[in-house]
Amino acid sequence: MKNKVFAILTVLILAVATNGFAAETLSFAGLTWTQVDDVWQVTDSGLVNAGTASTNTHIFAPLDQTGNILTYTWTIYFGDTASATSGPMAGLHLFVTDPWNAGRGDSLLIFQDQNRLVLYEGVNGTLPGAYRLEVTEAKVTVGETHSYKAVVNTVSGAVEIYRDEQFLYTWQPKNPIPDGSYISFRTNRTIAMLMDFSFSSK
């Protein structure tokens, strides 16, 4: 891993008791994480993927994603990559309906590579060719850390996307928001850390 040091990650899932949010605090490792593909380190601090061979690393956890307004925030550190063309790549699936499926069944995937932030609407485990939006203003290189936020209105279906606290786009998927009850982190030939994940519902 080229002597990279994994610093202690302060990762919590927080549901803050303000603005109608439920009062609940869970440790990150308190979720039931299931590793499907590649080598993961799951601790109280967060998730670390230390492999660069797999093009679709796979780990998931159940998360009740009900409510009218759902807010997700997370941070990703992008480490070394074995991809010579797309650079470091990692992202998060929301509303996963089939966590064991390589494509995660139906889901919304927010995925970063070196050239763009891509928003996928996965249907029946299919991502290539699926409806998607590319935000080319959002790029990344090895060694960078970026924060992300998705605000999902499950009534209208609108998804607001932020990176580094800057609003990027409001995305309207073609289909209703999936009713999946899992989240799944994935990387593509990239060493990456998932940090500071939070979720709130109202």
Image (cartoon, helix red, strand yellow):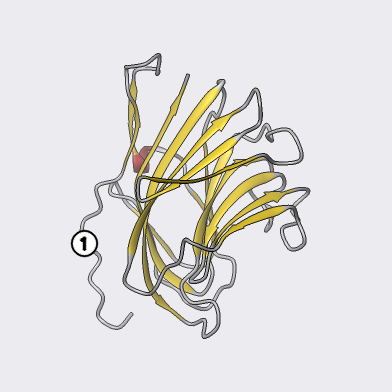
Q: Nearer the viewer, residue 200 or 165?
A: 165
Name the residue carrying label 1. 7
Q: Residues within 10 Å of mark 1 (few under 14, many from 20)?
A: few
Q: What residue sits 37% from the left and 74% below the top? A: 142
Q: What residue sits 55% from the left and 83% below the top? A: 85
User: Tag 1: residue type?
Assistant: Ala
Query: Which quadrant of the view contains residue 79?
Result: bottom left
Q: Residue 25: horizontal and vertical position, in percent?
A: 32, 27
Q: What residue sits 53% from the left and 28% below the top? A: 64
Q: Nearer the viewer, residue 7 or 86?
A: 86
Q: What residue sits 52% from the left and 78% below the top? A: 53
Q: Is residue 120 left or right of residue 74?
A: right
* In the depicted structure, whether residue 141 falls above or below residue 22: below
Q: Residue 199: horizontal and vertical position, in percent?
A: 42, 33
* In the depicted structure, whether residue 5 falls above or below residue 125: below
Q: Residue 110: horizontal and vertical position, in percent?
A: 55, 52
Query: Which quadrant of the view contains residue 95?
Result: top right
Q: Residue 92: horizontal and vertical position, in percent?
A: 52, 51
* In the depicted structure, whether residue 172 falls above or below residue 132: above
Dot 1: element? loop
The N terminus: image quadrant:
bottom left
